[in-house]
Amino acid sequence: MFLEVLILIFLTAAALWTVMTRSLLRSAMGLALTSAILTVIIFRLNAPLAGVFELSVCAGLIPVLFISVISLTQALTYKEALEHMKSRFARFWALPLIVIIAGIILILMNVKLKTKLPLPESQADVRFVMWHLRQFDLLGQIIILFTGVFGVVILFKERKKSG
Amino acid sequence: MVSGIFVVLVFVIGIYCILATHNLIRVLIGLELLIKAVTLLIITCGHKTGNMALAQALVITIIVIEVVIMTVAVGVVLGIHRHNNSLDSRNIRKLKG
Amino acid sequence: MSALLVLVPFFSVLILNLPFRPAGKKLVFGVAAILSLLQMAAVFIPDSAFWRVNQNAFGNIFNFELSADILSKLVLFCIGMVSFSALFTTRYFIQDSDERFNFINVILIAVAGMNGVVLAQDIFSLYVFLEITAVASFILIAFNRDALGLEGAFKYLLLSGVATVLMIAGIALLMLSAGSTNFSVIHSVLLNHNKDFLISLAIGLFITALFIKSGLMPFHGWLPDAYTSAPASASVFLAGVVTKVAGVYVLIRILVSVIGFSASIKSVLLFAGAISAVIGAIAALTQSDFKRMLSYSSISQVGYIILGIGSGTPLGIAGAALHIFNHATFKSLLFINSAAVESELGSRDIEKMGGLAKQMPVTSVTSVLGSLSCAGIPPLAGFWSKLVIIIALWLAGYKIFAVIAVLASILTLAYFLTLQRKVFFGKPNDEFKDIKEAGFSLAFPALLLAALMVGVGIFSPWVLNGFILSFSSILGG
């Protein structure tokens, strides 16, 4: 139990670092780190398939996507970067305080929950659930992947007239 | 429910990031953090009810959707960069809100 | 078989793109037009095997749980109608056939997504298809890759993303309490324990997310920007149907089939609806950009619909549903008109316009009809839906809100009269002396929508009774 809480604290710390760090590249890498820690939590809670997806996609594909965009767009000049650092600190210093205060408030709230115990046959495997019970969602996934393809084709093209 | 507390904390971090940043890519990173928080929430709820199969199915679907949204978002951000030559969110105030 | 409404648009996109691309480019318009007409017709297939739950279509390969009641069928009809009109406008506005091909494909995907939202019987599937619709909308808004369009798309994307996250959180909490994501399962659980903190939190998250998606105040920030900066055909499509399905329909469906009405939910709806209806109308009065005025008008009309839902009675919900249909008709019509004016004149500034009635007769006549319907003037269709909503509010005991609704109606009439006077009547501007009427591709859908408005308005007294009765069966169960 204590280990779980420790990992969760690491998760929050990684998320905090992702937001507070100055450089965009480090931010994207922080995102990858946060996803990796989340994957550990998911695996510990006995959800291996979701963990694999989370690791490969959210800790791999999406940070790579962000890093390529960051590399494709211009960096600031040195003077702009200095100014940027100062204004950044002014905007972001409140965040760790807010997180700690929110954490304390939530611990004190101590929400009790009422859950419904599942029906016995839900001991089924993910694969069974996905194919037999959630077919409509699978169709939705296929359609949205196609939509993504259209999005890439339409949005990533240079305009024919000069911009 | 211990992880519930952390879900809310990561959520708060994500929202703060979106509100306080001037950079469009950071806004997307903030959105990503929000989705992480909610993924953790689903897995926790699945664990509590014992219905891990359903929770995993939901998480996998959400991850697929998230990838597509991020791809389209990155496309839009690249387009904005081509026009303004910067990623400063203060520059995209042309429309009068 | 109702799964066909989702499968067929999607498979047409596949077929048009993968094997037969050159032929696909020529056929895409015809295929899409036929599909939308078929969708409008399919709504009238009587209750039978077509709409049965638990389809085992195509010999057990697909096993979807879909079903539709009167509300879903109404919305399906709207989707077909607006996509048909939007298709025609693409012939006028998108000259390049490659671009038009992509555009119509994305519209077909959005139609498949919206049909999925309407037919789903499970909160999570509803969410998945909602996302499909949302992504298709981002692409449509950003379609021309111009600076304003991308900016509008980004703002919509951000707010929609936050709404998404809130909705998933709500789904997770409901799954925690009910063990499943199916509508009926959750409904039966909620009937027993609805004072629980987590359940109230889940309901609150859902309603917030849907308010953001519908463009209600105070979450309306993305709406004027997105509608104004989108390309003309996309604005027609978005304003007519996407925001209604993605926001308002889902709200009605969740409240009716899953959560149920409680006093606090109703007061939240009534307040939000009243504020949007009145402030949206006031904001519309001050606009000088044609499309922006129409966007604020949309916010105001959605406020009206929410007022109808907030009454919590079958009468109110029937009025709200009828207003969804009417809004789809007159708002698409008005956006087509504004697009015609914009493309002929090259500007959207209504201060500069005047006296266009002589030069653009079809546009001005249809726009007068659209404006009157929106303001709620008999015998046009808008009058009936507004009347039903006002009566429902009065009968349910929310007399103040009924008065506010009437006030909003008067404001609506005010800004539309201003619009008509400045644009179509009054002194003509010399700059725009040589303007001609917009072509057939714009006039045809405009006339069609106007005819529908007038027709529904004239026949409403006869069909209204039966229509409202079918709604009591949804709520009663």
Image: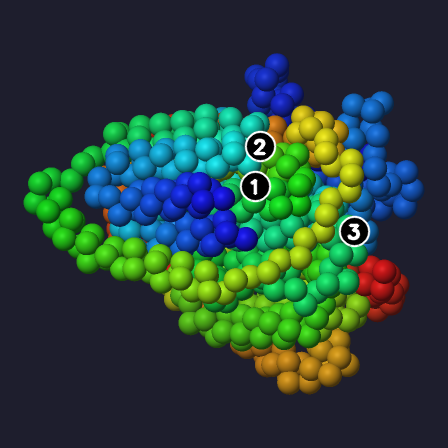
The residue that mark 2 highlights is A47
Label 3 SS = helix
Q: Is residue C152 left or right of residue C302?
A: left
Residue C133 visible? The answer is no
B69 vs C222: above or below? above
Q: Quadrant of the C terminus of chain C?
A: bottom right
Label 2 SS = loop
Q: CA distance from mark 3 to mark 2?
A: 27 Å
Q: Are marks 3 and 1 on the same chain?
A: no
The residue that mark 3 highlights is C184
Chain to which mark 3 belongs: C
Q: Amino acid at mark 1?
A: Ile
The residue that mark 1 highlights is B43
Q: CA distance from mark 3 to mark 1?
A: 23 Å
Contact between labelled residues 1 and 2, with CB atoms less than 8 Å apart: yes
Residue at 55 percent across and 36 percent down: it is A45
Choose mark 3 or mark 1, whichever is in front: 1
Q: Position of residue C59 (x, y in %)?
A: 85, 23
- Displayed quadrant of residue B87: top left
Q: In front here: C338 or B89?
A: B89
Q: Amino acid at mark 2?
A: Ala
Label placed on residue C243: none
Residue at 52 percent across and 62 percent down: it is A110
